[in-house]
Amino acid sequence: MSEDNTIHKFTSITEICNALSITRPTFYRRVEALGWSKDKREFTDSEYKELQKTLYINNGKISKRDKDNTKNTEVTTNIIQDYQQQIARLHNLLDQQQKLSLDLQQKLNARDERLEQLESTQQQYITLKDHSEAQAERIDELVRYNEDLKQKLETEQNKGFWSRLFGK
């Protein structure tokens, strides 16, 4: 047997209202809104379900509460859209901040690498300078030693045969 074929039979309006757990005026409003006779006592299963549903439209009229709800919905929608726009702007700003931070970090890393290269070069220069100073001192010693030898040679050459032989 189909669901629509089930017939709900009632003997009075009060019995219908009790079964639906609604008041008599509510029953009359629903029946009128559905376009049925007020004296109807038998309903198919689908008609019975229609009677159980709460009606949101009052004979095509919009109540003050519905207008307020619509207005509140519009205000809420506008607020949500504003928040979404603000969130989008904040995301853009956050992206920009992250890109700038990354760029700054890359520049700092490049500067640190360059500084390390300069420090390494400076250390090499200092090492070479120290080495060259040591070499310069050694060269100075050798030059002095060479000059001393030249002077001794000249002195020896200026001495006569007998002075050279007896060491005077």
Image: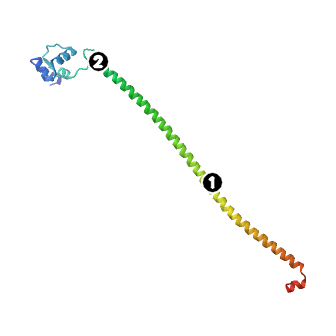
Q: Is residue 62 left or right of residue 113?
A: left
Q: Residue at x 73, y 67 (%)?
A: 137
Q: Secondary structure at mark 1?
A: helix
Residue 121 vertical position relative to residue 43 in the rendered view, above or below: below
Give the residue number, with chain letter if any, for mark 2.
64
What amino acid is found at the position of numbered circle 2 in the picture?
Answer: Lys
Q: Secondary structure at mark 2?
A: helix
| Mark linked to residue 118 | 1
Q: Quadrant of the C terminus?
A: bottom right
Q: Residue at x 59, y 54 (%)?
A: 116
Q: Position of residue 36 (x, y in %)?
A: 18, 14
Q: Position of residue 61 (x, y in %)?
A: 27, 14
Q: Closer to the N terminus: mark 1 or mark 2?
A: 2
What amino acid is found at the position of numbered circle 1 in the picture?
Answer: Leu
| Residue 9 visible in rendering | no
Residue 87 vertical position relative to residue 26 in the rendered view, above or below: below
Q: Position of residue 55 (x, y in %)?
A: 23, 20
Residues packed near mark 2 inside 10 Å, few (<14), some (14 to 19) or many (20 plus): few
Q: Position of residue 27 (x, y in %)?
A: 17, 18
Residue lying furthest right: 160
| Mark linked to residue 4 | none
The image quarter in which residue 12 lies: top left
Residue lying furthest bottom: 166
Q: Residue at x 72, y 66 (%)?
A: 135
Q: Quadrant of the N terminus?
A: top left
The image quarter in which residue 120 lies: bottom right
